[in-house]
Amino acid sequence: MHGITKRFAGVTALADVSLTARAGEVLALMGENGAGKSTLIKILGGVQPADAGEIRIDGRAVLLDGVRAAKSLGIALIHQELMLAPNLDIAANIFLGGEGAGGPLGLLAPLPRAEMNRKAAALLARVGLDSPPTTPVGALTVGQRQMVEIARALSASARIIVMDEPTSSLSAQESARLFEVIRQLRTDGVGIIYISHRMEEVQLLADRVTVLRDGRHVGDLGRQEATTDKIVALMVGRELTGDYFPKKTAKGSEVITAGGPPLLEVKDLLVPGAPAGVSFQVRRGEILGFAGLVGAGRTELVETVFGVTPARAGTMTLGGQPFAPRRPRDAIRRGVCLAPEDRKRNGLVLPMSVAENSSLPNVGSYNRWGWLDRAAERRVAKAEVARLGIKTSSITTKVVTLSGGNQQKVVLGKWLAMSPKLLILDEPTRGIDVGARAEIYRQVAALAADGVAILMVSSDMEEVIGMSDRVVVMRERRVAGVLERAAFSQERIGALMTGAQKAEVSA
Ligand SMILES: Nc1ncnc2c1ncn2[C@@H]1O[C@H](COP(=O)(O)OP(=O)(O)OP(=O)(O)O)[C@@H](O)[C@H]1O
Ligand SMILES: [Mg+2]
């Protein structure tokens, strides 16, 4: 890609950017949230046209005037925001629009059903997903849907495969499986363009690194020179120093935690679909982490606590009073908030502005004389944009036009601004760049120090260990163990997650 330029109303997303991908090589494409990574690869995938620039494949200039054109040239894109049809099953999603899909609206099966299922099953085995091909995609977790996307790219036997933050919702184990697939593809001579905010992955996989900053190409690094410090310095345009995780010595949290009664007590809570009840408690000022593989039941559990799906049995108390929310509104009224994992589905109203989205869950508190206090809404939104470094041309910009990571910052920002009693965070830093991540950790720790109890579901082991006071490890929808801070280690949590170690409850 040479001299690629792309403007949106008011924003130059890309200015004269060049990128080279080679066969049999993994190129990592790095940059902060809003740097232009997704925009660049959408141009490569024929999703949107460039305003200027040239794309050459095998040295020959090509016209990528649509997804179909890109596909026929062997380019497969795995999007940051999953693009699957939730009401169709896995096999249909894999082969939808694939080679031969020429039926009316492109929706008719390109292959006889039995063959489609057989081929899908083989692809699913390659990505390590053991759901039957006839499972509706809507019934899958985000992590499992990601695997279906990858299977779909594999089905097109692409020469260039672009992955936009593929591991953002995968467990460590699933990621490891994906890396095997990537290495195999590299050996097979496929050119891979890999976007990620996780430095360990880049160190593990990348043969070269290309860095974007504010829509400009700021550097290419070979494997030897691509140290994390160098990449980060290029990304943010300065050296990033300071502690990543806030110190656990914040005395506020010690004082509040010590011996206080639980704020939330959950007893034998039976989540729909779970084999057994779950019990745990959390005190004011405490950060309780939830570790587990994708599909371990953590999201379902916290959604039940939040009233998304009522519990089938069991009891909860909040501040000593019975707590049985039948919908999220009941929970919000009692001072419980949930920042969800799937921001597109539950967290944001995409056609609304940044300001409207940041006041959304909290409209009550803006309501002075029965109408919405726009000035207060703007004040809160502006503060949030500044604190988290949300890259948006203004607070009236529609959220749908923000980059993925910046959308995630808007979701988190709105909940952090509410100072609830109990804050539930589901994968809080997924897709968020290094700089903003440290700020989010700081804000979460500050809320805890103020006495807010926090439940934090995270598949990022470093994050779980770095932030939590205690960790609940879940496996197959049960509690496999609860570990105190002194007993944390990657190995111990990992062993409980995978069942390599028998259930254990310390203290
Ligand atoms: N359809 C659109 N309309 C207006 N602006 C857009 C549109 N799509 C992208 N942008 C803007 O282009 C810039 C680059 O966005 P892009 O999604 O490429 O960032 P990114 O590097 O992928 O970030 P992230 O790490 O958050 O995914 C951002 O400022 C974004 O708001
Ligand atoms: Mg992106």
Image (tube, grey):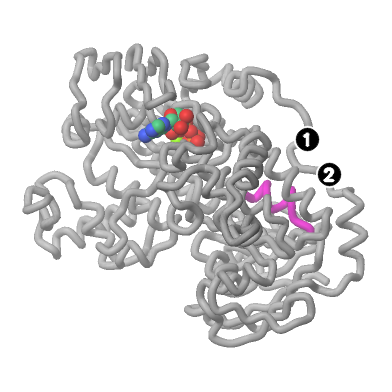
Q: Give the structural element (helix, strand or loop) at label 1.
A: loop
Query: What is the three-letter code of the residue carrying label 1?
Result: Asp
Residue for badge 1 = 243
Quadrant for the C terminus in the image? bottom right
Quadrant for the N terminus in the image? top left
**Residue 189 appears in view:** no
Task: Look at the picture and state if 165 lies above or below 57.
Answer: below
| Circle 1 crowding by C-alpha within 10 Å: few under 14, some 14–19, many from 20 | few
Q: Give the structural element (helix, strand or loop) at label 2.
A: loop
Q: How far across and how far down the image is residue 317, in percent?
A: 72, 80
- Main SS category, magenta section: helix
Ligand 1, seen in the image, is in the quarter at top left
Q: Which residue is farthest left?
A: 103
Please report contact status of discs 2 and 1: CB closer than 8 Å, yes or no: yes
**Residue 267 appears in view:** yes
Determine the image quadrant of residue 141. bottom left
The answer to if 194 sits in the magenta stretch is no
Q: How far across and how far down the image is residue 205, in percent?
A: 49, 33
| Chain part drawn in magenta | 459-469
Residue for badge 2 = 247
Residue at the image position 63 percent from the left and 86 percent from the top: 314
* Residue 329 relative to residue 72: left or right: right
Task: Look at the picture and state if 328 lies above or below 233.
Answer: below
User: Which of the two residues, 41 or 320, is positioned nearer the viewer here?
Assistant: 320
CA gap, disc 2 and disc 1: 8 Å
Task: Look at the picture and state if 103 lies above or below 38.
Answer: below
The answer to if 462 sits in the magenta stretch is yes
* In the image, the residue with mark 1 has its CB under 8 Å from the nearest atom of ligand 1: no
